[in-house]
Image (cartoon, rainbow, N blue to C red):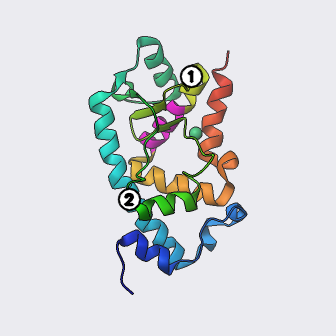
Amino acid sequence: MICAGLIACALSATPPLLAADSQSVHASAIPASQDEFLGRFMDYYVRWAEGIEERGQATGESLDPDQARLAADIGIKHAERVRLVYVDEVPFPTDNPEIRAAGEKFGFIGPGIINNAQAFGYTIWVREGFSLDRPRLAHELVHVMQIERSGSFAAYARQYVLELMQFGHEKSPLELEAYDANRRYAG
Ligand SMILES: [Zn+2]
């Protein structure tokens, strides 16, 4: 088999991983080939995300004092590192066709999927037009706290994707923890 890239290789060797009805698949039940595919996708994605984090650190806005207090309250140890980056579109490595295919497979991108905001470490990327009010900021700050708690973006991202596959977006423990902050800081 001739492979154009890691992901193309993995894709051609792997049956569809995430069909719409596959969210009930338990993470431990993922066959080795799918696990390998996930590993290859994540390796690429994490390296790419490190570049995004670096860019966001250079171009983003620091939190204002009120937002910094919220970050500390949520449990972020280094609130001074958090940056908000406003963009037309929250980035995803769609330039790479293999990764694009994998992103569609995982449900990260595709028709009808709009990513409003995402944390890549200490940088929170926000789609212009998405109003980042206090509950929504609290939600994203919880993801920053989770990344900090995980010790690395790589560890967090892997856990995130495994939970996504096992529970679906709405019931994944990392998302439930973040949505809890929407409610706590709604007032
Ligand atoms: Zn979230």
Taking the spot 41% from the left edge, 41% from the top edge, the residue there is 120
What crowding class fits label 2: few (fewer than 14 Cα within 10 Å), some (14-19), or many (20 or more)?
few
Whole-number angstrom distance, CA of label 2 to CA of label 1: 30 Å
Secondary structure of the residue carrying tag 1 is: loop
Mark 2 or mark 1: which is in front? 2
Quick one: which residue is furthest to the top in this view? 65
* Amino acid identity at mark 1: Ser
Return the x and y of residue 69 as percentages of the image width and height.
47, 17
Return the x and y of residue 106 as percentages of the image width and height.
56, 59
Residue 145 painted magenta: yes
Taking the spot 43% from the left edge, 19% from the top edge, the residue there is 68
Residue 133 left/right relative to 68: right
The numbered disc on residue 81 is: none
> Which quarter holds ligand 1?
top right
The numbered disc on residue 131 is: 1
Q: Which residue is under mark 2?
A: 96
Residue 99 painted magenta: no
Dot 2 or dot 1, earlier in sequence: 2
| Near-viewer residue (47 or 79) | 47
* Amino acid identity at mark 2: Asn
Taking the spot 26% from the left edge, 31% from the top edge, the residue there is 58
Q: Which residues are magenta?
A: 140-149
| Near-viewer residue (39 or 75) | 39
| Above or below: residue 78 compared with residue 113 | above
Taking the spot 38% from the left edge, 35% from the top edge, the residue there is 122
Give the main secondary structure, helix, strand or loop, of the magenta stretch.
helix
Secondary structure of the residue carrying tag 2 is: loop
What crowding class fits label 1: few (fewer than 14 Cα within 10 Å), some (14-19), or many (20 or more)?
few
| Near-viewer residue (17 or 146) | 17
